[in-house]
Amino acid sequence: METRLTSAGSRPRLLKKLNRALVMRIIREQGPKSRAELARSTGLSDPAVLKIVGGLIKDQLLQEIGEGDSTGGRKPVMLDINPDGAFAVGVDLTPEFIRAAVVRLDFSTAAEATVPIDPGEGYDSLLQHMRTLIENVINESQVDKRKIIGVGVSHPGVMREEADRILLASNLSSLENMPLVEDLQRHFQMPVVLEVDARASALAEMWLGEARGIHNFLSVDIDVGLGSGLVLNGNIYRGVNGLAGELGHMVIDPDGHPCACGKKGCLETLVAFPAIIREAMRNPGPILKKYCRENPPPVDIDCILEAVEHGDASAVRSLRGSAQALGMALGNLLNFIDVSTIFINSKLAAYKELYLQEIHRTLSRYFLLTNEMPIKVLPSSLGRKGEILGMAVLVMRPLFQAEPESAMAAA
Ligand SMILES: [Zn+2]
């Protein structure tokens, strides 16, 4: 991997930051390296590598892990990321629960905790839940608090990147226009970043999952809502107002079911969990009645899926209906955004034949290049953990990538 850094040559501090990030990035992406190998893959001189590596070891971001194979001469000392050199707190805020984890520099999890919430809860109560949960998970992890470099919170709303505010969150409306970032920052005295949940999981897929090396893809989140993270040319695409990827509120039937956003017949009302539950319970058969009877109302998706596993016809039909509605929308969308792969991030993705293949079959009918360019529909490799990991990536990314995103894509 050759990276030219000549344009930064006149700015020593920036150059140092870029070179440190370059070394960290190469080791993260390619595994342990010796100093000599680092000099070769970065194009930097041996003395420069010695200095950079020395600094990274002193800051505990890199560690020596023993000797590697010799290519004649002395065995080289290998260097790897020090997992305990820095930490991020990733938080996944959903209408049903908040989950938080302390994530190490190698993106393994040091501790994780979840608290259920009510989507109707007010902002102050949500903030309190979040603060307590984060404090608990930090304590439980027993990590050195001074090494936690930030908190990242994923949420199911719409936000502008620069605004630090959630503009719209139809499934968790008490968050709208609230100073969540300021409040958490003041409390924890560390940087706090927000990101849309589907974009966080797309980012995690790109850094840690099956999307490594895929530069154009869509990651679709299906739960009580429906959203997506769009990656174009290796970068998350946000759009001018942060709306890009808002798949769920594409109106399919103006006279259809009411949607949480206030409109009728949005795609979300045909695809997301409430739609599957509604359709399955419309005319429940004996199996569905058996599995969903003991569930306290409202019926949740898990009992519907249990009925699917036991062959209940209306539950199966309802799941297939969701896949078909999504497949049709994606087929149309593909003609417009032209990406190669679609990741489905949802517990529904476990139903490979019934759900994923149904999406694929349907979208293939609408995508113009079906015969020439087979589209891949894959389950997300990280599952619901993607949101937390994606937020940890967002917090720790500057250690690995000092360049702006667009420069990375051009590299
Ligand atoms: Zn809607």
Image (cartoon, rainbow, N blue to C red):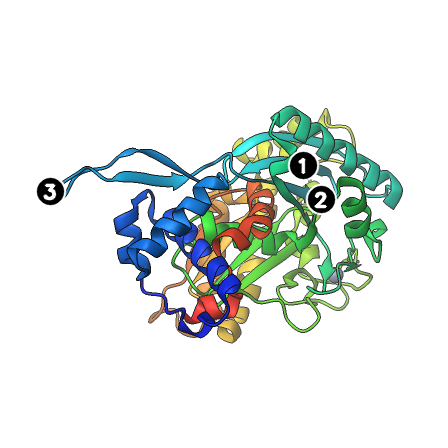
In the image, what residue occupies the spot 71% across and 38% down? 98
Image depth: mark 3 or mark 1 in front: 3
In the image, what residue occupies the spot 66% across and 43% down? 92
What residue occupies the far left of the structure in this picture? 72
Give the alpha-carbon distance from disc 3 to disc 1, as whole Å: 51 Å
Q: Earlier in the sequence, mark 3 or mark 2?
A: 3
Q: Which amino acid type is shown beneath numbered disc 3?
A: Gly
Q: Residues within 10 Å of mark 2 (few under 14, many from 20)?
A: many
Give the alpha-carbon distance from disc 1 to disc 2, as whole Å: 8 Å
Q: Residues within 10 Å of mark 3 (few under 14, many from 20)?
A: few
Q: Which amino acid type is shown beneath numbered disc 2?
A: Thr
Give the alpha-carbon distance from disc 3 to disc 2, as whole Å: 56 Å
Q: Quadrant of the C terminus?
A: bottom left
**Residue 111 visible, this angle:** yes
* Along the line of sight, the residue nearer the viewer: 117 or 40: 40
Q: Secondary structure at mark 2?
A: loop
In the image, what residue occupies the spot 88% across and 42% down? 124
Q: Which amino acid type is shown beneath numbered disc 1?
A: Arg
In the image, what residue occupies the spot 28% across and 38% down? 77
Q: Secondary structure at mark 1?
A: strand
Q: Which mark is residue 99?
A: 1
* Along the line of sight, the residue nearer the viewer: 141 or 69: 69
Q: Which residue is mark 2?
A: 94
Kindly indicate the quadrant of the structure image that contains residue 293: top right
Q: Which residue is mark 3?
A: 72
Q: Secondary structure at mark 3?
A: loop
